[in-house]
Image: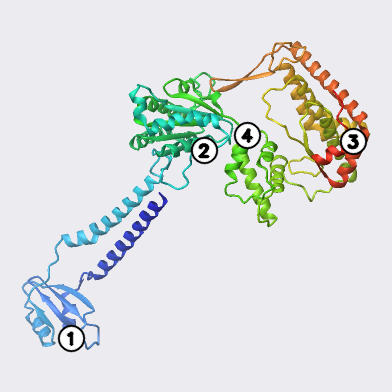
Amino acid sequence: MRDHHRRYVTVAYLLGALAILALSHWLSSIDPPPRVVPWSELASDVEAGRVVEANVSENAVVAGLRAEHASDDHVTERVTATRLPDVDDRDVVESMRAHGAVIRGEVEETSWWEPLVFGWLVPIGLMAGLWWFLIRRMNQRGGPLSVGKSQAKIYDQNQRGTVTFADVAGVEEAKAELVEIVSFLKAPEAYRALGARPPKGVLLVGSPGTGKTLLARAVAGEAGVPFFSISGSEFVQMFVGVGAARVRDLFEQAKARAPCIVFVDELDAVGRARSGGAAGVMVHEEREQTLNQLLVEMDGFDADSGVVILAATNRPEILDPALLRAGRFDRQIVVDRPDVRGREAILEVHVRKVKLAKDVRLEAIARRTPGMSGADLANVVNEAALAATRRRAAMVEERDFEEAVDRIQLGLKKQGRVMTEEERRRVAYHESGHTLVALSLPHADPVHRVTIIPRSIGALGATLQLPTEDRYLLTRGELLDRIAVMLGGRCAEEIVCDDVSTGAQNDLERATETARAMILRFGMGEALGLMTGGGQDSRYLGGLDVSARQVSEQTARAVDLEVRGLLERERERVIAILRERRDVLERMVARLLEAETIERDELLALVGASPPSP
């Protein structure tokens, strides 16, 4: 597409240059009109011998004059004089002949249409043609006059960089769902023979970065059909009606190039639930007209036409119900974050072009990155390659991946930050408290590394825990152990230091949120029993987020008291563990102050004996 555009621009420039050259050459070849002079002045020029040639007609004389005091016959100026009636001017003519002038018996007449055509119509036509050509190309490329044109990018199957299912990993369930779409685009006759109707629209739902757009392009690549890609925000414009016009133009282009795939990213930008014009509710007229046109277009074409609509959103709860009914977006496919096997498969895809050392274990990296999406893992691989480049290494090693994961999760190392010895000591006790509690509880995730190196996100230290497997259910004991690990740093400061600090702010917030969720949402408390409260329940009504409190004030007070009691009980348990293993805590702190970072193997050696039973 870009090569064709460059050719058109080059041809336009060449045509313009040729038109300008032709026009300038033609204008230079046209003689200026003769200057009108009185008959007496012409007679003086004749007496002076300046007339070289003359055209004599019944009414006028057109004479070609040489320059003053010139001896050659080169004409430098033309003049015309009107012959006077009833005056004998034969003396003037005879004087011209006497001075050697060439006398002609008639004047060359110039037709009225020649200056009109060649002086005005031809140049204006050339310029108008060039202008029309340029404006047409600008409109086709999204210029200022193409307001109502679709802004969708078109990817043809013959272009380089075609994406297939081999380039998508970690979302096997979603890929299996989309195989049917591919088979319909490849062989629609098999469906029509049995009377089956393929889905008109498929909605991909998932968190940002999970690969929804990549999946849509893979479907087009597998089927070998054109792929129209546009964002929902590109439909909604300042002027009412522009978005609806772009929707119509998009579907017209899609029908003309069927079979094809139309992909609308961020569908919630245009498909948000309509307010219905309720009082006190702001109505976005342009967005609603665009949504109405989209609904009409989806109803207006047959599924057998070969046009499949794919859309993606990470907020399906706010979409208009009319979009999700049968006959429009018939199928919803959840694109979830990958598990450990999916993360390993995604890493294998992204490291194809990376020179890896033999010590790199993708399985270990996948276990170190729980909760990361496909885009996050691509960033990890890129950061590892950048780290190896900074070291001027020939290959990317496992330590580069370790640095990349730490950089993404914790931020950059603050090498220039100067901390007092007392602050370093307090941070060491704080992180050692987290680590020792995690190593002492049976349900806590294993500790991978502990460090007191400050990071750019504001953390003065970090304790990294890596789960051995992906967890989809958590028991009450596991949640209590997580709260205990969060309180380990604050409790270590209480035991060793004279006063507590602000370093446990984030730990206390997360511990409180976990305890409140146990009581309000999971039914693990006594204040509500098996009833769930949820605290604040956000619902989407008529285009507005409406929050409704689900518990009474008396119940909320009882929940607050139970949350506080749960945290106090866990605090006492953590303090008991730290006091019982105070010698291990001191050894860990001393080693941290010396090395600043302790890996898992060294941590296990410092802890020594097996952890006590809960």
Q: In this view of the protein, which residue sits in the foreground, 381 or 205?
A: 381
Which residue in the protein does label 2 denote?
A: 214
- Looking at the rendered structure, which numbered label has been put on residue 49? 1
Which residue in the protein does label 4 denote?
A: 341
Label 3 secondary element = helix
| Residue at figure coordinates x 67%, y 14% from the top left | 550
Camera-side mark, 3 or 4: 4
- Looking at the rendered structure, which numbered label has been put on residue 585? 3
Q: In the drawing, does residue 255 fall left or right of residue 529? A: left
| Residue at figure coordinates x 46%, y 28% from the top left | 202
Residue 284 appears in view: no
Answer above or below: position of 531 versus 48: above
Task: Measure how far apart labels 1 and 3 are at the Cα level.
Answer: 123 Å
Answer above or below: position of 309 versus 458: above
Task: Point out the tag, 3 or 2, that comes first from the N-terminus.
Answer: 2
Task: Measure how far apart labels 1 and 4 are at the Cα level.
Answer: 107 Å
Task: Point out the tag, 2 or 4, that comes first from the N-terminus.
Answer: 2
Task: Point out the tag, 1 or 2, that comes first from the N-terminus.
Answer: 1
Amino acid type, callout 3: Leu
Task: Please rate how many residues cluster around mark 4, counting C-alpha atoms within 10 Å: few if below 14, some from 14 to 19, many from 20.
Answer: some
- Rendering coords of residue 470 (x, y %): 67, 29
